[in-house]
Image (tube, rainbow, N blue to C red):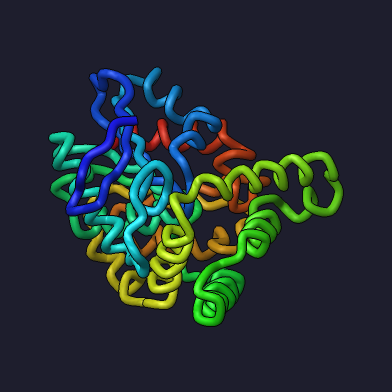
């Protein structure tokens, strides 16, 4: 990956394809390395559909730098806007997954001059009780320990990534995901990145201001929710899409919060179909 200094933070990025149909930028979730976009096949599918694809490691995710926390979603959005400026991109489509969806939502509202359409994947809606409970747990751990222990993060991610029936009945898939999430621990630049991303998510989820400002988003937005997502259930996503003037909604059946990896074809088809008309 190449890298650039964006407002004093070194960000690593990659650009793929020539893009006769325009540019799509992919903003990953908390601690999510760009490799995940390759694993789910979205990079390849967008390239084949005629888009240039930009992926990057957010601040805190290796090999990008991890300035001292806390971070905010505004910080992460400013990083992305700076990266687009560095690359000379002034008109793109944006996909944000989980934490990256918070960034995409803010970019859609603040920077419609840069973003022509956005997909909010597993990220939009009034946060449910599980989201808020996780916020409380992470905030208390950081206050008490100054960090978020890896075993806690790994277990929390396991219990929310897969549908309940899989967690209960599919021993093999659960074991595979446990190993995968162990590898995910290596994706962070440092513990500063872990704490920084957590702080950004907690602040965003605890602040209702962005919810009240959904009607200010003027660009087309697809809110894509997973059927079994404990963080952003479909009903919450449907309400968000209804409040956004040009909002659309789709539910990915059978998936929990990690639907991007467990149900990639459904996610890819929904994203490409949406971008064809925006």
Quarter of the image where one finds residue 95: top left
- Image position of 62 (left or right of 233): left
- Image position of 61 (left or right of 92): right
Residue 270 at x, y = what percent? 47, 37
| Quadrant of the snapshot with the C terminus | top left
| Quadrant of the snapshot with the N terminus | top left
Residue 199 at x, y = what percent? 42, 70
Quarter of the image where one finds residue 193: bottom left
Residue at coordinates 24% horizontally, 50% vertically from top-left?
Answer: 219
- Image position of 47 (left or right of 130): left
Residue at coordinates 51% horizontally, 45% vertically from top-left?
Answer: 187
The number of discs equals: 0
Residue 240 at x, y = what percent? 41, 63
Q: Is residue 132 at least partly visible in the picture? A: no
The front one of 228 and 153 is: 153
Residue at coordinates 59% horizontally, 53% vertically from top-left?
Answer: 257
Quarter of the image where one finds residue 259: top right
């Amino acid at each position: 990956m190449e890298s650039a200094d964006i407002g004093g933070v070194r960000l690593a990025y990659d650009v793929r394809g020539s893009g006769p149909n325009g540019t799509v930028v992919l903003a990953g979730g908390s601690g999510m390395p760009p490799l995940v976009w390759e694993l789910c096949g979205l990079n390849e599918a967008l390239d084949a559909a005629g888009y240039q694809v930009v992926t990057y490691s957010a601040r805190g995710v290796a090999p990008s730098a991890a300035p001292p926390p806390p971070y905010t979603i505004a910080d992460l959005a400013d990083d992305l806007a700076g990266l687009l400026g560095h690359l000379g991109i002034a008109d793109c489509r944006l996909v944000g997954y989980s934490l990256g969806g918070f960034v995409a939502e803010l970019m859609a509202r603040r920077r419609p001059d840069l973003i022509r359409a956005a997909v909010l994947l597993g990220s939009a809606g009034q946060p449910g009780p599980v989201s808020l409970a996780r916020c409380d747990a992470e905030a208390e751990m950081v206050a008490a320990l100054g960090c978020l222990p890896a075993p806690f993060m790994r277990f929390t991610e396991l219990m929310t990534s897969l549908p309940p029936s899989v967690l209960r009945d599919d021993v093999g898939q659960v074991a595979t995901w446990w190993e995968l999430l162990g590898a995910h621990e290596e994706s962070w630049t440092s513990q500063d990145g872990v704490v920084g991303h957590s702080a950004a998510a907690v602040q965003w989820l605890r602040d209702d201001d962005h919810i009240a400002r959904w009607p200010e988003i003027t660009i087309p937005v697809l809110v894509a929710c997973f059927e079994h997502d404990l963080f952003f259930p479909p009903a919450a996503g449907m309400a968000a899409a209804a409040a956004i003037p040009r909002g659309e909604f789709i539910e990915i059946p059978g998936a929990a919060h990690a639907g991007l990896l467990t149900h990639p074809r459904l996610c890819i088809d929904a994203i490409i179909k949406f971008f064809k008309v925006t």
